[in-house]
Image: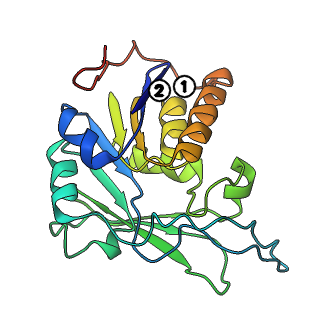
Amino acid sequence: MRVEHIGDCTLYLGDCRDILPTIGRVDAVVTDPPYGIGRDGKPRSSSRHGGHKGYEFRGWDDGRPSQETFSTILSLASSVVIWGGNYFADLLPATSKWLSWDKGQRIDQADAELAWTSLSGALRVITLNRAEINQDGAVHPTQKPVRLMEWSLAQINASGVVLDPFMGSGSTGVACVRRGCGFVGIERDAEYFDIACERIRKAYAQPDMFVERPAPAKQLSMLGDE
């Protein structure tokens, strides 16, 4: 296992099933788990919309997280956002405040994606063109736009320390840096872990001048990590 500390962010290279039980409570969880639909890679394509780059299939989307993993996640925070919630509806409690990302294009892919939240309230929708992923720098086959993750944080009024146990390329971490939150990320793929570290370092190097930085976030450490 490897641990990187970058600003108010603590990043773990490892399996969240091993690491989550060692982490204390956090202020919020915002994550985008594997859906179990085989989207861990995709061939390159081209179209009048610009197409997308290709990604090696790595096998991490062969199955979705277990009921035990979701139970552990829900025990760590009262405010939780889980993208792809429609794939996990049988594993999560009923709730009223769902989030919807309208991707701003009507092509031969999903028009929108859904996120489950632990909170009560009205369903909320954001329209954000999927092309923003390319503007962020597309590096992951299921990458979410950073602005979408910032909006997700705002919908639960996230502050303090935010956890993402399926960090991928680090979009949630970048959003946390921009919002002024602390961040704990876990990723088991070494290449994506390194990409996430680099993106978060760059986010600190190019801070949002309109965000007032809070006092340093409380530090979370894994048992045995000094």
| Circle 2 residues within 10 Å: few <14, some 14–19, many ≥20 | many
Q: Residue furthest bottom?
A: 108
Q: Quadrant of residue 10?
A: top left
Residue under label 2, please give it.
180
Does residue 193 appear to the left or right of 90 in the view shown? right
Q: Amino acid at mark 1?
A: Val
- The residue positioned 76% from the left and 73% from the top of the image is 44
Secondary structure category for the residue under label 1? loop
Residue under label 1, please give it.
211
Total numbered labels placed on residues in the image: 2
Front residue of 189/204: it is 189
| Circle 1 residues within 10 Å: few <14, some 14–19, many ≥20 | few
Q: Position of residue 54 (x, y in %)?
A: 72, 67
Q: Quadrant of the N terminus?
A: top left
Query: Taking the image as drawn, is residue 159 in sight?
Result: no
Residue 79, compared with residue 66, is above or below; it is above
Q: Are marks 1 and 2 in contact (CB under 8 Å)?
A: yes
Q: Amino acid at mark 2?
A: Gly
Q: Position of residue 212 (x, y in %)?
A: 51, 20
